[in-house]
Amino acid sequence: MDKLEKLLLIVIVLICVFALAASGFFSELIENSQNPAEYNVSDSTFKINNWWSVINSSNDSVEFVADDDSELGSTPYPIYLRLTQYTNTSIFESKYLNSSSSSDNYSIKTGNRTIEGIEVRFINSTDTNRNKTFLDYYFQKNGKYYSIQIKGDTYPVNELHDNRIETTVELIISTIN
């Protein structure tokens, strides 16, 4: 190939790339990777970031695991998230009280927060023997009762991925209906 043929080939490739960009091909790829997916739990729908994959589902709960090669980064320690919808306030309150009860093997911190305008009861419990952390969020929205439980090894949950987890929780709470 002489210089003119190489130059012509480069021009053709650039024209093709420009045509794909102008047609929206690349923006669609970027948009699809950033658009949160929509799921159902009981009679509610919600959105969750694409770095979570469903591993188990029933009528009243959906469980996800963070993808290893996702925006959370590769980690040998999986992080799980379960969203549950409760049928009534007594079951909801019972689950909250059970989760917030202290135990010899757990260090438990509780508090209230407002996330996306919704009052949320928050529990951070760490298993002192196995170095596991559970983050529980209990909230009511539109007359329905929910909890989000995140569990994993303490370092990835509390330090390495805390901002991504917070983003996920805020997205779920803001979009669930």
Image (cartoon, rainbow, N blue to C red):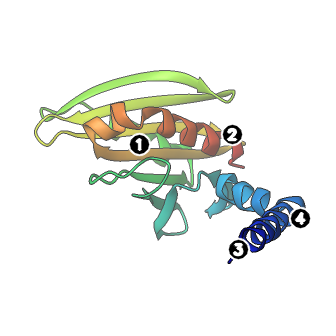
Q: What residue type is labelled 3?
A: Asp
Badge 2 or badge 3: first in the primary sequence: 3
Q: Which mark is residue 94?
A: 1
Q: Which amino acid does label 4 sit on?
A: Ser
**For numbered disc 4, what is the local secondary structure?**
helix
In the rendered image, residue 91, in percent from the top left (x then y), is placed at 47, 48
State the residue lying farthest toward the front: 2
Badge 4 or badge 1: first in the primary sequence: 4
Query: Is the residue under label 3 in contact with that under label 1 (CB below 8 Å)?
Result: no
Observer able to see residue 2: yes
**Residue topped by disc 4:** 23
Please tell me in which quadrant of the rendered image residue 82 appears. Answer: bottom left
Query: Is the residue under label 1 in contact with that under label 4 (CB below 8 Å)?
Result: no
Q: Which mark is residue 115?
A: none
Q: What residue type is labelled 2?
A: Ser
Residue at 68% across, 61% down: 43
| Horizontal side, residue 7 vs residue 135: left or right | right
Q: Which mark is residue 2?
A: 3
Crowding near the residue tagged with mark 3, few <14, some 14–19, many ≥20 C-alpha atoms within 10 Å: few
User: CA gap, disc 4 to disc 3?
Assistant: 32 Å
| Horizontal side, residue 134 vs residue 143: left or right | left
Q: Nearer the viewer, residue 165 or 19?
A: 19
- Disc number lying in front (1 or 2): 2
Badge 1 or badge 3: first in the primary sequence: 3
Q: What residue type is labelled 1?
A: Ser
**Residue topped by disc 2:** 174
Q: Nearer the viewer, residue 114 or 33?
A: 33
Residue at 32% across, 54% down: 78
